[in-house]
Image (cartoon, rainbow, N blue to C red):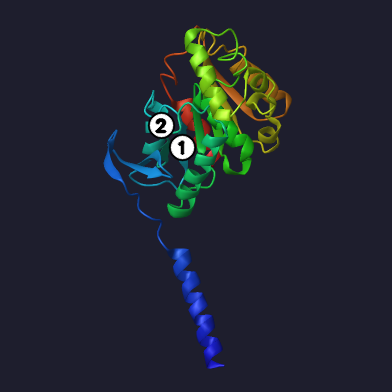
Amino acid sequence: MIRIHCLVGLILLVATSTATADPKPFAGKESTWNTFKRFDFKVDGKDAIVVVPEKPAPGSPWLWRAEFFDAFPNSDIELVKRGWHLAYLGVPNQFGGPKAMAAWEKFHDVLVKDHELNPRPGILGMSRGAMYALAWGIAHPDKTLAIDLDNGFCEPRNWPGGKLTPESAGEWNNLLQAYDFKNDAEALAYKGWPLDNLATLAKAKVPILLVYGDADKVVLPQKNSEALWNRYQSLGGPIDRRIKKGGDHHPHSLPDPAPIVEFFEKAAK
């Protein structure tokens, strides 16, 4: 009987210790990013960055920057000021393909299991980062808080798969390799592109914010942001937008990032 009581006590002690264990501190190279601590390290051989707030907000929310870390970062900075972690994993030229998503899954596991960040990050998809953001959300709606698409590229059949220029031809080849397509026809016939698979996100009621210039000559709004707006609305998904009248592809974000910050903060609450 004494042995049973001791065993039960030991189990309770271990369970209590596990439940109250602090998250692992971030390792790697430490530096400063806009006055905040920044850590650069590797996850499965990929370059990872995490910026740590001075005081984490309740629930440990975080913003996942999909591509172009530190580009037009005013909303990122404001969220870190409010207690959000900021994270990035370098898997460039993958267009949100299967290899990129496999790397993202490992990164997500590290941040959630080892560092106890919230299982549902907010995701910022700037330009081609939208392909990553949407691919993650469609595959993992239960691990997605909200998605902000900033002049988001999400229709590869238009670019780089439309009328090829020397620049777009190189990007098209990157896309073919990222998805292991054998030829152009296989890529153009692919049924897994984000715009064709928004139902999962809409059913899960994952909110989407579109920020885009209506004169974008690089990522045509009619083929990308506006097409997504129409389709997500028709599926009953929660979506909002901020249109920059006369705005081209650059600059990204908004002069005042308050609408973007409030979008993520509202989702977190």
Q: What residue is drawn where x is 43% and y is 25%?
A: 257
Is any atom of residue 87 visible in this view? yes
Query: x and y percent of residue 89 in the render?
Result: 43, 37
Which one is nearer the viewer's eye here, 189 or 134?
Answer: 189
Residue 26: x %, y % from top left: 35, 49
Height in image: 154 above or below 217?
Answer: below
Task: Name the foreground residue: 130 vs 179.
Answer: 179
Which structural element holds mark 2?
Answer: helix
Q: Position of residue 252 (x, y in %)?
A: 44, 19
Extreme residue in the bottom direction = 1
Is 16 situated above or below 269? Answer: below
**Drawn side of residue 155 relative to residue 38, left or right:** right
Is 118 left, or right, of 35 in this rendering?
right
Reading the image, the residue beneath label 2 is 76
Name the residue rendered at 55%, 23% in the picture: 175
Q: Quadrant of the C terminus?
A: top right
Question: According to the image, label 1 marks what residue?
Answer: 63
Q: Specify the farthest residue to the front.
A: 182
Image marks 1 and 2: residues in contact by CB distance under 8 Å: yes
Comparing 173 with 105, the one in front is 173
Q: Mark 2 Cα within 10 Å, few/some/many (few <14, many 20+)?
A: many
